[in-house]
Amino acid sequence: MLNWFHRLGSPKSFFEMTGRWLTGLMVCSVLLLVTGAVWALLFVPPDYQQGNSVRIMYIHVPAAILAQSGYVMMALAASVFLIWRIKMADVAVQCIAPLGASITFLALITGAIWGKPTWGTWWVWDARLTSTLILLFLYVGIIALRAALDRRANAGRACAILALVGVVNLPVIKYSVNWWFTLHQPASFSLTEKPAMPVEMWMPLLFMVIAYYFFFFTVWIMRIRNEILVRERGADWVRQWVVAK
Amino acid sequence: MMFDSLSAFAQMGGHGFYVWAAYGVTAFVVALNLYWPKLLMDKFKADEEKVIARQSEKMP
């Protein structure tokens, strides 16, 4: 197991290992996402209050979950980079930021579209929505900070520190619906309690969350592989890989 | 199956615009996320092949 982690820390072995998984991961992600979407659009019963707009939940909730858990993963990678100076951790931070930003954007935009028929407004400056918007700015800030700094080592350290500082926003997002009286409803799910909705509604939602995780890891790995190639450009093994392909 | 006809499916009981807009944006962002890295990798490969070809010309 330790050896396995050690290999993930080396750019060359990471590239070789993930090269074997990639096609499978891509096929799985697309199949899971399409199945989940068909399930949510065609087979889930409409909500007795919201009608068919409840189908937006199946793409909004997983996006919101991934936006936050992606940030946790980024912060973990950032701390690994700051403590042990493992370069692959910096690559991981760099590659998750645009992905996290796009998923947070999806959470916000699908939330706005869902908000219009449900709450009667696209947007309110409610604590949950505002803190999620700040999450988007954090992701974008990390992308911009890296682009602004020339030396890779400095940029990596600065981004890692910003990623860690931004962690304070996560409990704000999570507990915003309990701390303040917000328009956004509190979570309908928790790991410890029985879900408050019927099984034919939460099953597809759980399925979609898993599908989003697959998609997220697939894209993250694809981006990391590209960044490895860029950073190792000119190395013998990269040349051999280019010629062999 | 929750819909009797294709038009009922498209209209979503009056919420068609919202449901389809949300799914459309999601499909676009997901597809872009999967396609973009592949595009970059293909470009990297093409560029490096050129570099390698140029170098092997110089060193006969």
Image (cartoon, coloured by chain):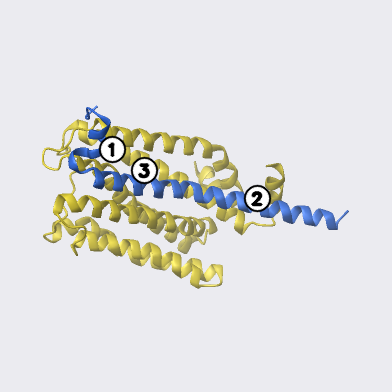
Chain colours: A yellow, B blue
Chain ID at mark 2? B
| Amino acid type, mark 2 | Lys
| Residue bearing mark 1 | A206
Residue at 73% x, 56% y: name it: B51
Do discs 3 and 1 belong to a common subunit? yes
Q: Secondary structure at mark 1?
A: helix
The reply to whether residue B24 is visible in this rendering is yes
Labelled pair 3, 1 in contact (Cβ < 8 Å): no
A187 vs A156, nearest the viewer = A187
In three-dimensional space, the C-alpha distance between marks 1 and 2, rounded to whole angstroms, equals 38 Å
Q: Dividing the image into 4 quarters, which one contains the C terminus of chain A?
A: top right
**Circles 1 and 2 in contact, beta carbons < 8 Å:** no
Alpha carbons under labels 3 and 1: distance apart:
10 Å
- Judging by the rendered image, the residue that carries numbered circle 2 is B45
- Which residue in the structure is indicated by mark 3? A212
Which of pointers 1 and 2 indicates the residue nearer the eye?
2
- Disc 1 chain ID: A
